[in-house]
Amino acid sequence: MATCQRRRIEQSLTARYSDWIAEALDEIQGCFLITDPGIAGHPIVFSSRGFVAMSGYSREEVLGQNGRIFQGPATDRRSVMEIREAIREERSLQISLLNYRKDGTPHWILFHLCPVFGVDDGRVAHFVAVQVPIPRRSRCSRSSAEAGHGGATGRLFGACRNEVGSDYDLRCNVAVDLFVDVDNRDSTMLCQLLPAGLEAEESREASEQEKERASDAANSILSALTQYSKLTGKVVSSKRCSAVGISPLSSSLTISLGRIKQSFVLTDPHLPHMPIVYASDEFLSLTGYSRHEVLGRNCGFLNGPDTDVEVLHQIRQSIQAEHACTVRLLNYRKDGSSFWNLLHISPVRNASGRIAFYVNVQSDENAKSDGLGLSPAMRQLGVVGTVKVAVRSLSICAGPSRPSS
């Protein structure tokens, strides 16, 4: 993991919730993870002691990773898509999921996901993912009354997963014919006749008690995050409380933008002073500012005493005309040092053709080549194209989310 990425992961919680948040979270019982959609790759930034014990991974092995590392060959793709959809829509979700421990053994969990919103801007600051183990509940050993069916037929079909039961009707019926008179002592033999892999993939439903445990754990975590966020003034909530007129970026768009490894920002032309609503990690490295120091500000904070006002006027004219422009501009980092910024600004339109954002792509004139032989102009156009695809794709799926004027 790169040093810059590691530092952002380490500061993800402390910058918003204070230096004592990790200690407070460690006191909460249960298995849970906290992820940050604002960092490229949507990595895990906290792992509870309970999760470490359950999964077999150490914290060092988990931090910085995406949650997909716990999935495996028998993990239900539909369940994974439901989780991704919940992240995209920034909503809570409870779902049974087959995950894998470090040693490769599968285990069923109740996966409880909930977003954590910043009160000031309405953006998702983190996601909390509580995991409650779902123990094996042997259906083969149930009595006919418990299974709701008669004899071995009920015991067998109780073990057949609804979604795939039709695929195995023939084999299940053969088994019933063969063992219609078996008693409970032979139930193990009956289970062994199930198709290979069916037992491992059989979906387990969480009990009401397990669902309550997951909800209680999530509430305890959210309570701790809310309490400690007040110490830094960056208060969070389990519900979005954005200011009037502000439409925060969705987590799905944020994650897509996080994959772009170039310095750029998105600004919102529908808000006063066109504030920055997204800043890439590379932009933060280039300028020396942290994310919370950048979001909500106009790009003019990079200007200084020797910045050419004629160039700034040219930029304003291009924005008013809704045209792209490329300029050479003297900008300043947080530490006061200056750099020549080869800046490209372009409007980004949504699926309906209206401007949703402006993308500003920065390139330090003295920066080293990327090793691919691409000119700064070609790299900038690549960023613009990728951003446009991400915004249009999201607006097609979610419908118009930006002002129409």
Image (tube, rainbow, N blue to C red):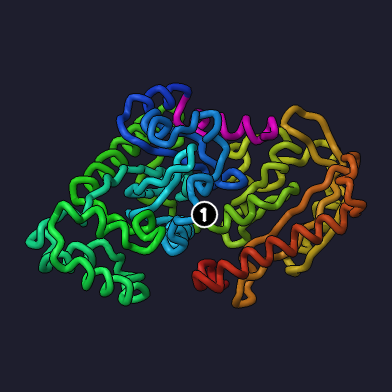
Q: Quadrant of the C terminus?
A: bottom right
Q: Residue at x 64, y 76 (%)?
A: 353
Residue 350: horizontal and vertical position, in percent? 61, 71
Residue 133: horizontal and vertical position, in percent? 31, 43
Q: Is residue 396 left or right of residue 115?
A: right
Relative depth, front residue between 76 and 259 = 76
Q: Is residue 365 left or right of residue 48?
A: right
Tag 1 residue: 251
Q: State which region is magenta.
A: 1-18
Residue 216 in view here: yes
Q: Residue at x 35, y 48 (%)?
A: 108
Relative depth, front residue between 319 and 156 = 156
Task: Give neighbour class at mark 1: few <14, some 14-19, many 20+ (Cα, 10 Å).
Answer: many
Which of the 4 quarters of the picture holds residue 3? top right
Is 190 contained in the magenta span?
no
Looking at the picture, does residue 28 appear above or below residue 180?
above
Q: Is residue 398 left or right of residue 349?
A: left
Residue 348: horizontal and vertical position, in percent? 68, 66
Dominant secondary structure (helix, strand or loop) of the stretch shown in magenta? helix
Q: Residue at x 43, y 60 (%)?
A: 76
Dot 1: element: helix
Relative depth, front residue between 328 and 387 = 387
Q: Residue at x 60, y 77 (%)?
A: 352
Relative depth, front residue between 362 and 312 = 362
Residue 117 in view here: no
Under mark 1, the amino acid is Ser
Q: Is residue 214 left or right of residue 201?
A: left
